[in-house]
Image (cartoon, grey):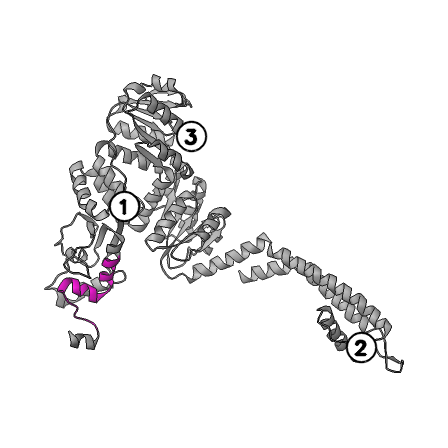
Amino acid sequence: MKDSILFLVLRRMRAPLIAIILIYAISIFGLTLIPGVDAEGQPTAPLSFFDAFYFISYTASTIGFGEIPVAFSYSQRFWVTICIYLTVIGWTYSILSILNLLKDDGLHRALATSRFSRKTRRMTEPFCIICGMGETGSLISQTLDQVQMRFVAIDHRPEPIQELELGDYQADVPALQADAQLPATLLLAGLQLPACKAVLAVTNNDDTNLAIAMNVRLLNPGIPIIARAENASIAANMASFGTNFIVDPYTLYARRLALALRNPSGFQLVEWLTRVPETPLPEMPHPPTGHWIICGYGHFGRAIVHQLDALGLHDQVTIIDPRPTNPDDHKSILSNGTESSPLVDAGIAGAVGLVAGSDNDINNLSIAITARHLNPKLFIVMRQSSAANSILFERFHANLTMVTTHTIAHACLSFLTTPMLGRFVREIEKRDADWAEQVLNQLKPITKGLVPFVWRLNLTQAKTPALHQWLSNPENQSTPLQLLHLLTSNRHRDEPLALMALAIERAGKLIILPAANTELAIGDKILFAGVRDAWNEQRNAAQNLNALEYVILGHSATGSLLGRLLA
């Protein structure tokens, strides 16, 4: 990389350097040919090459020193006058070329690439590569920064990179404006470094995400790939070569809407656990069952209709779409749905719910406003494609709003930061409303009105050395490590931490809502939800044997010799 910058500078400065060299050569050569005169006016030999070089060096650089070794003849002075103006012109040309070089986009890219490469090579903490810093990538990066996970950012547009550099992040974020589809870009981002733990392909283009996933699988087969895919054929292509997690936001949200229809408490629990931590908790929706109108039969609309059919509402679904489609034997109307007449024809007066799911945010707002005017009691679900329109959707107050970028970001973060959470969410989808309500009642006093942090604790020597040491010591068999000890404050032993254990994964099996007296073993993976302070305090006990012994025994048995004597 340093060589490429040097070659770029030499290439841009080639003409000025040649001009300076020629001017110096001509000036020096002329002085070695023109004879001088002595004090008596007698001719003397011309200057030697060294004297001529020495004189031109300090004269051309405007330092000035005098005529050496003796006063010059008028011929020499005439030639020196010409040389002065020639060198001034040459240096002016060179300086202007240097100033122009400083504005050269190629040099800026080369310098930025060099800085980016140095930063990534120096990263020793685990990090992930985010390809695409649009609305989705930006939300993911902010959340990763909150949970203190390092990342590297790539985007082909300059604006997201500039916003990232100006952002208020806890750690320095290496960012590069480049095409993430190119294998060289991914290698520069540290794809083959040991600290690289995952790659997220979350650009707005499915083909680009497919290319990134393919490159990663070939360049580093063992690394997890999280990719966004809104097209079913591209998602199938990604799955064919082993992409670990494929995010289809429309199918995912359709499943969540179906969960809200049959189990509102379960839907609220999923929302609480998968949203961005420390944001306000969403209210629990109560979507009714009955006649639903689906405006927009694209990917999102088809996913919604499929879920409604699975709930037994096949005969109570009406589709409105401007394109001739195959509505799967549902009643359909050919229209945008922005006017009142197609909504009336669809039976808006007797409908219980409406989905404004077209590809255009303004059309969705128009559909929703018209529908609410015709039926104020309607349960309205809206699709929002751009986060820039958030203020408009907030003013309307839809019952549910599917923000595409947020749905993708939440899914990616769940898989990236807490892989166990996906299994727990699937368990929520299987349980009934009473069970979900029980979990919500335990979470409510902990959350304090904000979305909780969700994290996984691995009982391994690398992740939790204090817990591993306690479990490995045969002398501690009489005092087994229990889940209760990880729920207790290591500052005040009588106080519980503001968190709860959601599940324990042991030998591939999931223990849901484990009891506090559950004995733990090496290799266990525990899923927790709680506040940031509780997370930090629990991490201290997991890594610091003194803190852990205080929680378990009520005192610390380790420490310095003086400390043990005083104890």
The residue indicated by pointer 3 is: 362
Q: Earlier in the sequence, mark 3 or mark 2?
A: 2
Residue 160 is situated, as x and y percent measured from the top left of the image, at 46, 47
Element on which disc 1 rests: loop
Q: How many angstroms separate mark 1 from mark 3 (CA)?
A: 30 Å
Residue 508, image x, y percentages = 21, 50
Indicate the position of residue 268 as horizontal and vertical percent values. Answer: 24, 39
Q: Quadrant of residue 403?
A: top left
Query: Residue 9's spot in the image, x, y percent?
Result: 61, 60
At label 2, which amino acid type do we have? Leu
Whether residues under marks 1 and 2 lie with C-beta atoms below 8 angstroms apart, the answer is no
For the residue carrying disc 3, how many other residues have a C-alpha within 10 Å: few (<14), some (14-19), or many (20+)?
some
- Residue 3 visible from this viewpoint: yes
Check residue 451 in the rendering and tell me which mark sits there, or answer none.
1
192, above or below 297, in the image: below
Considering only vertical position in the picture, is 318 above or below 394?
above
Residue extent of the magenta highlight: 536-559
Q: Earlier in the sequence, mark 1 or mark 3?
A: 3
Classify 482 as above or below 307.
Answer: below
Q: Residue at x 41, y 28 (%)?
A: 363
Which structural element holds mark 2?
loop
Decide: few, some or many residues near mark 2? Use Cα within 10 Å; few <14, some 14-19, many ≥20: many
Q: Where is mark 2, residue-wise?
A: 47
**Residue located at (70% from left, 59% from top):** 93
Residue at figure coordinates x 74%, y 61% from the top left = 89
Q: Is residue 366 magenta?
A: no
Is residue 180 in view?
A: no
